[in-house]
Image (cartoon, grey):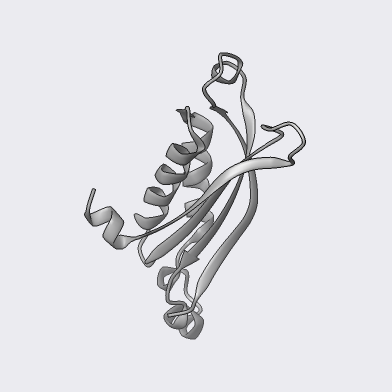
């Protein structure tokens, strides 16, 4: 299967980091997602029930990120991946989470992970 839904440059604010200041002040995080799914049925029917509802998924991610207080971007990325894989029709997800301005002389620093349904089953 080669169908993908892409959500680009979702900019949110959350508590994230290990330093004292980072544990108090919200910071920007930039999130990019690539969701593997089969779009054929939705493409034929033109019905949202046959598709991954990326609006609902994005709302869940916003709620998760804005209410979270992770120390590591790795942990936040993992939780976002789990949230995506819980949605019907998502077989695999690639999640990139970046912290803009976290490193001097760099635009951002972050992680990209890829998880699939077998990762959910093994947890």
- Seen in the image, is 57 located left or right of residue 25? left
Q: What residue lies at 74% left-to-right and 31% top-to-bottom?
A: 104
| Rendered image quadrant of residue 22 | top right
- Residue 29: quadrant of the picture: top right
- In the picture shown, does residue 45 fall above or below 7? below
Give the residue displayed 41% in from the left and 45% down from the top: 78
Locate residue 55, reporting x and y percent.
54, 56
* Image position of 87 (left or right of 109): left
Number of marks: 0
Against 12, is 32 above or below? below
Q: Quadrant of residue 7?
A: bottom right
Viewer-side residue, 16 vs 56: 16
Q: Looking at this rendering, what residue extends furthest in the bottom direction? A: 44
Q: Residue furthest right?
A: 105
Image location (x, y in percent) of residue 49: 41, 69
Q: Nearer the viewer, residue 30 or 54?
A: 30
Query: In the image, what residue occupies the spot 43% across and 38% down?
Result: 75
Q: Position of residue 90 (x, y in %)?
A: 39, 64
Q: Nearer the viewer, residue 50 or 37?
A: 37
Q: In the rendered image, which quarter contains the N terminus? A: bottom left
Looking at this rendering, what residue extends furthest in the left direction?
122
**Residue 110 image position (x, y, % from top left):** 58, 43
In this rendering, position of residue 115 left or right of residue 117: right
């Amino acid at each position: 299967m080669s169908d993908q839904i892409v959500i680009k440059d979702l900019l949110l604010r959350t508590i994230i980091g290990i330093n004292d200041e980072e544990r108090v002040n919200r910071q920007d995080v930039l999130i990019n997602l690539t969701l593997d799914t089969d779009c054929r049925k939705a493409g034929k029917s033109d019905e949202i029930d046959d598709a991954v509802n990326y609006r609902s998924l994005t709302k869940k991610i916003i709620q998760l990120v804005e209410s979270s207080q992770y120390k590591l971007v790795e942990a936040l990325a993992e939780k976002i991946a789990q949230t995506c894989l819980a949605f019907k029709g998502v077989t695999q997800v690639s999640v990139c989470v970046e912290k803009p301005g976290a490193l001097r002389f760099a635009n951002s620093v972050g992680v990209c992970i890829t998880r699939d349904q077998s990762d959910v089953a093994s947890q």
